[in-house]
Image (tube, rainbow, N blue to C red):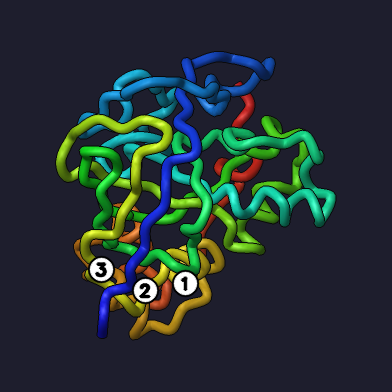
Amino acid sequence: MMQPDLSTRIAGIFHGPIATPWAGKAPTAIHKSPVHGPQKIDFDGFTGDAQADLTVHGGADKAIHHYASDHYSLWQDETEMPLTSVPAAFGENIASLGLTEKTLCIGDILRLGTAVVQISQGRQPCWKLGLYTGNTRMPYLFQKTGRTGWYYRVLDPGIAQTGDKITLMERRQPDWTVERVTHARLTRKVAPEDAAVLAHMEDLAAGWRAAFARMAEGDSGEDTRARLIGAQE
């Protein structure tokens, strides 16, 4: 199978600090603002960015979150987001046009500015997304539509800025689009044989491999209340 020629430009880079905007709720760094000029990327992501809870955001397998700006007009047409919504409304680190969950695959290796990154998993939406967007249905809608964005692990640190190219360098898992794998993970509707393949896919984030290993054994139950509703302090 020939590797597709996928390339676009970074339309925006966004960083955010840790804050506590909601009384009785855990801190968050979901509020991101545009940053300009060269931005350093190390193995934990952008050095100017922060993550509040490294058990669910950040870390090697979730160093950078990329969201397709292509989706914003869809959310607006569906009246789920205001017409004034602009990139970073979902807390993403990178915005672009032309790359989506349908065209990218788990394990894809891309050049991001001078850095080299690899797609490790889709995004599991949480309660913070609902509060931040002002639409409490948004975590559910992310799961329903598959418009979740995706995470990168960093293979080679470097520098990136708005306007730099994002280019697909290597496609390792052509049968497993981000959309397909994320749908299987979030709905837990996956054939045991497919779950077994994903459980052993080294390109996939470790946490997702473990979840698919359980599914391969027939255990599709999962308590998602803490992620989708949030625990009260």
* Residue nearest the observer in this picture, 28 or 96: 96
Task: Looking at the image, tell me whether mark 1 or mark 3 is earlier in sequence order.
Answer: 3
Q: Which residue is mark 3?
A: 171
Contact, mark 2 vs mark 1 (Cβ under 8 Å): yes
Label 1 amino acid? Arg
Residue 185 to residue 133: above or below: below
Q: Quadrant of residue 82?
A: top right
Contact, mark 3 vs mark 2 (Cβ under 8 Å): no
Work out how far the residue at label 1 is from the one at label 3, CA to CA, in angstroms.
15 Å
Q: Please, what secondary structure does the residue beneath circle 1 have?
A: helix
Q: From the image, state whether disc 1 or disc 3 is nearer to you.
A: 3
Contact, mark 1 vs mark 3 (Cβ under 8 Å): no
Residue 180 got which mark? 1
Task: Looking at the image, tell me whether mark 3 or mark 2 is earlier in sequence order.
Answer: 3
Residue 212 to residue 76: above or below: below
Q: Residue 120 appears at what percent x and percent y?
A: 31, 54
Q: Residue at x 41, y 37 (%)?
A: 163
Q: Please, what secondary structure does the residue beneath circle 3 have?
A: loop
Q: Residue 74 appears at what percent x and percent y?
A: 72, 56
Q: Residues within 10 Å of mark 1 (few under 14, many from 20)?
A: some
Q: Residue 155 appears at what percent x and percent y?
A: 17, 45
Residue 159 to residue 220: above or below: above
Q: Residue at x 26, y 81 (%)?
A: 2
Q: Residue at x 54, y 28 (%)?
A: 30
Q: Which residue is mark 2?
A: 176
Label 2 amino acid? Trp
Q: Residues within 10 Å of mark 2 (few under 14, many from 20)?
A: some
The C terminus appears in which quarter of the rendering?
top right
